[in-house]
Amino acid sequence: TKEQFITQFKKRLSEKYAMGVEDASPTELYNTLGSLMHSAYSSDRHHTWRQYLLNKQKQAYYFSIEFLPGKLMASNLLNMDWLETVEEGLAELGIDLADLTEVEQDMALGNGGLGRLASCFMDSIASCGLPGNGNGIRYEYGLFKQKFIDGHQVELPDDWLSTGNVWEVRKDSKAVDVCFYGQVHLEEDANGKLKPVYKNQQVLRAVPYDTGMIGYKNNIVNNMRLWSVEIPNSEESKYRSLEERRTIEDLTAVLYPDDSNAKGQMTRLAQEYFFVSAGIQSIVRYYHTLKEPIHRIHEYVAIHINDTHPALCIPEFMRIMLDEEGMSWEEAWAVTLKVMSYTNHTIMAEAMEKWPIDMLKQLLPRIYQIIEEIDRRFVEETELKVHDRSIIDRTRIINHNQVHMAHLAIIGSHSINGVAKLHSELLKTVVLHDFYSLYPARFNNKTNGIAERRWLQLANRPLSSVLDKTIGTSWRDNPEDLQQLLNYQDDQKVLNALAAAKRQNKENLAALIKKTQDITVSPDAIFDVQIKRLHAYKRQLLNLMHIIKCYQDIKNNPDSEFYPRVFIFGAKAAPSYAYAKTIIKCINETANLVNNDPDVKDRLKIVFLENYNVSLAEVIIPAADVSEQISLASKEASGTSNMKLMLNGAVTIATLDGANIEIRDAVGEENINIFGITEQEVYDYYESNTYSAVSYFEKDPVIRRVLEAFIDGTIPNIQSEGREVFDSLIRYNDEFFVLRDFESYVKAQEKITECYKDKRKWQKISLINIANAGVFSADETVKRYADDIWQIEPVTEYSSKKG
Ligand code: H53
């Protein structure tokens, strides 16, 4: 109750800081509340763990090099069913919960979609009562903090742990050793079995930090285990200088901020092995406490490889089965295949990880031997199956002095899935077609999903309360019940209430924009939002070109009618991705020009919010009118901001790419604005090699005028950047078909403006989007993983019958 909470809170504050509420700072109050929550859910964590153990339940382990949870306080309060009580209790003490959550630093151990998906899954797995855990790296520094200086992106370190982390628990007793480098050879042991003998290995200590993943009002608390590197006591004497120590500690120091290029850094490869080896060792150790025979481990353990970064799970699991559990190769391979499953998240060739053989051999000699043997057996087996030998060249793991991580992941997993229908089809028909012909039964689709608790219940309380009043509260447990809203699509009262909620969110965002960027925007304008990593294939440039066209239209005809729009961007560019940074500079300089041009008279505003992250997304998404999902068809595996924006009532403008197609199917053609060429047309262009960007420049005066603005000084301060963009389109033939799609994009944008002017029509479309977003609940997605791939079941109370 509220009274109990107040008593406990004051008591804890006094114990922790020897203070009363009046003297405590927001940080002290935040830490007090966090510690109170932590004590409360720890017993649930213990209970959950015991249930799994006593039931000997099969558990899934989600291995991911990225997790992007954002802030945890509000979502933990919601899931613990404490939110209202705590809010009221604090209010009575004169404290605003929002002031405390403000103190928390975003946990940004991920770059974008991949890491955020992993965190949505963690929330959903626990909320569905499923036995599933995360396994990753506790980076000392998260994704860089982005600042703009003279319109350029500048990266600052994200020292997120500097203020402490109330949610994590260091588990010294669960630390394991992870070995690198050295030499290895095989020797026969007393039983005639080959065993590896190591020399000169570097031994590092992996220390786990556990964070409870709290289920939604179900008392289930799963675990996200993140590993941090340390120098083991036994090795202390080896690393005397500060520099040597630092090199080792660097292993878990930073998250690689480039998720589009597998860079050849040793540290990155070492990171991959580090969390994989530590995770698998700890799983096997736990398995032994069940006292079940090792060859049945697949009945108790499912390991999921999230993108290729954890693909070393396969040889590492093999290593443990062979070298430590004494299995034969055949036995070890049989269980490995049954345990492992893999999700592919991209078809972009440059994101397909490959490592030079020499590097792998040097860093992980035993693992390399095992990979070689997996490859040898794969070739041997496949030769018997296929007539066309070229298939082997295209599918084997080791080729051209490189180790292909996706090939390893596919060959060693019983399930391979894509993340949206189109993406999974493209995997089968194009990108992984050879593998599909070898292992058709392994391929399946699992369309991504989002944690609707965070993205609606928490982020958009005005909308949530309209929903409660209109359709009751069942949607909070079962997002598909949002469908009931469809009964109100012609109810003006409901439409007005939805519009009022949107208005409140827009005012909120407008205030944030004023505060952080000192730009005044009117909530009467259309809020047009593109939020995602900056990447050429995502085509922020197409958006910018349309903005420039609008600006030129106004300039050419200053008194013409132009419906006010605010274009809002949020995006980080990988520090080494020069072209992406160029686009940022161009957007920022265009913003400077447009926002300060008196002719524009507030009809156009461009806002590029600095340091886009989960917390910022939680403010932007509820306020969006238009959702920009404009990647070149075939390139965006799924996208998930498209789902979050739809759920919050934004109307989508989209290409037929990724999950956009499924959004269209859910809302109907008339409630989404589709434009651009299809994936088939993209492939036709590739095949015929007939795309000519310059012809669009020559024949379309609008395109010509827009592109000239990049190089003729219209947009100041972008001499070199403007030229670079111009050249990428004209000289280098526009890799992502921006010019090809420009005209249809402009038309779709014009339709949006017309539609927005008809308030009632717009509100109805917005309602239809909200009502149909339930199918994208990550709860449903993880249930499909649980049933089809992991074969895990929701927890039941321990029954002694199970023995
Ligand atoms: O994964 C998201 C997709 C999105 C895709 C993204 C992604 C990364 O964030 C990083 C690496 C990678 O291979 C893919 O780009 O389309 O929605 C979750 O599946």
Image (cartoon, helix red, strand yellow):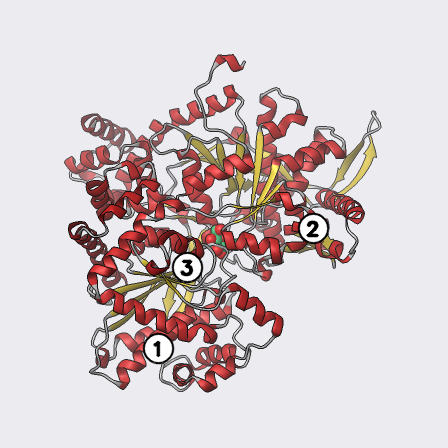
* Gap between marks 3 and 2 measured at Cα: 33 Å
Q: Which mark is residue 39?
A: none
Dot placed on the residue nearer the N-terminal end, 3 or 2: 2
Which part of the image, by quadrant, shows the N terminus? Answer: top left
Q: At numbered mark 2, what does the secondary structure look like: helix, strand or loop? A: helix
Q: Amino acid at mark 3?
A: Lys
Dot 2 alpha-carbon crowd within 10 angstroms: few under 14, some 14 to 19, many 20 or more? many
Asked whether mark 1 and ligand 1 are closer than 8 Å, the reply comes as no
Q: Amino acid at mark 1?
A: Ile
User: What residue does disc 2 label?
Assistant: 360
* Gap between marks 1 and 2 measured at Cα: 48 Å
Res 702 visible: yes
Q: Is residue 690 above or below residue 72?
A: below
Residue drawn at (60%, 35%), measured in percent from left and top? 280
Dot 1 alpha-carbon crowd within 10 angstroms: few under 14, some 14 to 19, many 20 or more? many
Q: Which mark is residue 532?
A: 3
User: What residue does disc 1 label?
Assistant: 548
Residue drawn at (45%, 42%), measured in percent from left and top? 781
Q: Position of residue 349 (x, y in %)?
A: 60, 61
* Gap between marks 1 and 3 measured at Cα: 21 Å
Residue drawn at (58%, 22%), measured in percent from left and top? 289
Asked if the residues shown at circle 1 and circle 3 are in contact, with their CB atoms under 8 angstroms apart, the answer is: no
Dot 3 alpha-carbon crowd within 10 angstroms: few under 14, some 14 to 19, many 20 or more? many
Of residues 457 and 480, the one nearer the viewer is 480
